[in-house]
């Protein structure tokens, strides 16, 4: 019936291009009806697609949006849509490149911490959707590692998501995520920490440089001895015993491996 | 393909804003519909809620990303994730739309329209067969709302759907609002659609609201079901006595109580319920 085996694909390409284009199409070859009617129909798809992707970003970045306001956020989302053609088969991952986009987004330059707040929102969402696992109790970890603590390696909870910023981005994130109105006193230092979802809720832990560095080393499958050294290197005034007790207080370890086990 | 038994009842979509309602009280629905993609995650609250709801209600899975119109075939990764979710949710059935969603590396995540050509029919049939073999069950295909039509089309949408069912053994999810929206947008008579569609293959019915934009109706799922859609629904239900009917609401979502009230209206608009009451 069809004269050309690739005809339908050409129709797809034309409609796809008309949806992606910055300017609305005046006329689309192959569509039925007068040009005004076709343009109105294509405009519905253009608007639906843009509104849906905006909605995905609004859901994923509530604190970022509150920081810049709904209007500016919509503008940034629109520019993001045109800068990075949406390609992910998973719509939930559409915003993954949004923080990097904000980093180089000239109109947002006056808020240098904005990309880091957006990164924290992605980390939170990844933790929220991560696999379930049972965290070990402190005594259990100690008992299992006691054979050879220095060489013990820890398996961390799949929901563990690290964040770090040279700005107090975590404080800014919480303040906006909780839609607070009170006065916000920000530290002048950067902030780092980890999200963990040991049960239904995502918990967030802000950490000093030493336990943070130690934990990241554990996450990279380094043994505990090396991890503690890395912690001390990151924060020379920290005490190894304090780093260790801080690590053990987090519901983050789900497995312990010693050379013998 | 195996036969899919009818499930007779009234349901609603399971939406995040209503999770707490489902966890804290008995909700008078016969089934819930989940948007498959929202639950294709590793873990966390949505899956926990699904597990809890599954204990009390039948579940149907409704997807938006299969892209049955794709000339390049279906994505096996997507189907594998869908199948894994189905093993967990044990749904009555899995549905998706008669549409395509992406081309040339662009994934629109929208339901884009097909030309109703012989070539498109071959493509969609091959894709449905592939999906059904992969998922080891027949699927339901939903009629979309559309805003452009193609001069290349050689058959109507209902003829296209009939051919799909005959050739692949698939079933239909009939969206009454989408019939109404497309009928207004493309100037056909909805009763021709209902007369021509293979109603014996319908297992599920969607009801929804739309919005008016100039000459076009847009399927926005953000309004109550309007009067003409209820009338069309009554006509359909006279011919399909047994089906799983539900209200779709995805935007501007009201409290669950309001949707349950609208579901009561759906029950009242179902002829056999009215006759039983009379
Ligand atoms: Fe629908």
Image (spheres, coloured by chain):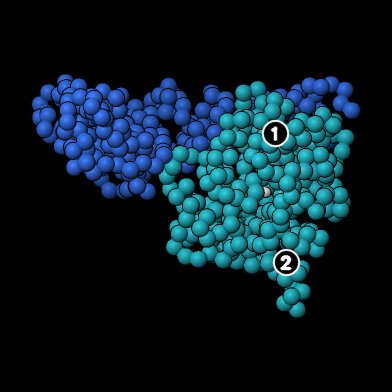
Chain colours: A blue, B cyan
Marks 2 and 1 sit apart, C-alpha to C-alpha, by: 37 Å
| Residue A40 seen in the figure | no
Is B69 on the left or on the right of B38, as rendered? right
Is B239 on the left or on the right of A221, as rendered? right
Check the image and report above or below for A9 versus A53. Answer: above
Is A200 on the left or on the right of B131, as rendered? left
Chain letter for the residue marked with disc 1 in the picture:
B
Give the residue at x 77% y 46%: B182
Q: Which residue is mark 2?
A: B269
The N terminus of chain A is located in which quarter? top right
Front in this rendered view, residue B105 or A49: B105
Please tell me which of labels 2 and 1 falls first in the chain.
Answer: 1
Give the percent coordinates (x, y) of residue B88.
52, 46
Front in this rendered view, residue A241 or B230: A241
Q: Which mark, residue B130?
A: 1
Chain letter for the residue marked with disc 2 in the picture:
B
Give the percent coordinates (x, y) of residue B235.
80, 61
Give the residue at x 88% y 22%: A3
SS type, badge 2: loop
Give the percent coordinates (x, y) of residue B123.
76, 30
SS type, badge 1: helix
Front in this rendered view, residue B213 or B12: B12
Give the residue at x 80% y 53%: B199
| Residue A197 seen in the figure | yes
């Amino acid at each position: 019936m069809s004269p050309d085996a690739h005809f339908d694909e050409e129709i797809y390409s034309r409609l796809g291009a008309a949806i992606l284009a910055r300017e609305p199409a005046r006329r689309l070859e192959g569509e039925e009806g007068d040009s005004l009617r076709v343009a109105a129909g294509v405009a519905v798809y253009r608007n639906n697609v843009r509104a849906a992707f905006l909605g995905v970003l609004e859901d994923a970045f509530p604190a970022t949006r509150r920081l810049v306001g709904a209007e500016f956020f919509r503008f940034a989302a629109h520019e993001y849509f045109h800068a990075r053609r949406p390609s992910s088969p998973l719509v939930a991952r559409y915003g993954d490149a949004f923080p990097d986009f904000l980093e180089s987004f000239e109109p947002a330059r006056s808020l240098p911490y904005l990309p880091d707040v957006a990164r924290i929102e992605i980390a939170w969402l990844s933790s929220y959707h991560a696999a379930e696992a049972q965290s070990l109790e402190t005594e259990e970890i100690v008992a299992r590692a006691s054979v050879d603590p220095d060489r013990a390696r820890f398996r961390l909870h799949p929901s563990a998501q690290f964040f770090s910023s040279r700005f107090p981005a975590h404080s800014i994130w919480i303040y906006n995520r909780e839609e607070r109105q009170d006065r916000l006193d920000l530290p002048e230092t950067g902030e780092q920490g980890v999200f963990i979802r040991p049960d239904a809720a995502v918990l967030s832990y802000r950490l000093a440089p030493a336990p943070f560095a130690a934990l990241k080393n554990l996450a990279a499958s380094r043994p505990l001895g090396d991890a503690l050294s890395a912690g001390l290197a990151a924060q020379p005034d920290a005490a190894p015993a304090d780093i260790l007790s801080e690590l053990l207080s987090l519901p983050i370890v789900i497995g312990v491996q010693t050379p013998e086990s | 393909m195996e036969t899919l038994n009818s499930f007779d009842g009234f349901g609603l979509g399971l939406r995040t804003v209503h999770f707490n309602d489902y966890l804290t009280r008995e909700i008078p629905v016969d089934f819930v519909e989940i948007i498959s993609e929202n639950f294709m995650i590793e873990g966390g609250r949505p899956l926990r809620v699904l597990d809890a709801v599954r204990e009390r209600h039948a579940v149907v899975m409704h997807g938006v990303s299969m892209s049955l119109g794709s000339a390049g075939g279906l994505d096996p990764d997507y189907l594998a994730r869908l199948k894994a979710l189905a093993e967990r949710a044990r749904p009555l059935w899995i549905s998706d739309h008669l549409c395509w969603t992406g081309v040339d590396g662009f994934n629109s995540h929208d339901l884009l329209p097909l030309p109703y050509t012989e070539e498109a029919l071959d493509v969609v049939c091959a894709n449905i067969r592939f999906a059904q073999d992969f998922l080891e069950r027949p699927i339901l295909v939903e009629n979309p709302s559309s805003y452009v039509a193609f001069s290349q089309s050689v058959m109507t949408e209902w003829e296209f759907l009939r051919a799909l069912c005959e050739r692949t053994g698939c079933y239909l999810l009939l969206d009454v609002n989408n019939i109404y929206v497309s009928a207004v947008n493309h100037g056909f008579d909805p009763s021709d659609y209902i007369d021509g569609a293979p109603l014996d293959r319908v297992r599920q019915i969607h009801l929804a609201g739309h919005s008016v934009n100039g000459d076009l109706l847009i399927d926005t799922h953000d309004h109550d079901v309007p009067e003409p859609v209820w009338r069309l629904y009554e006509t359909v239900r006279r011919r399909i006595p047994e089906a799983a009917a539900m209200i779709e609401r995805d935007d501007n979502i009201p409290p669950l109580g309001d949707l349950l009230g609208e579901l009561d209206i759906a029950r009242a608009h179902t002829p056999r319920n009215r006759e039983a009451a009379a």
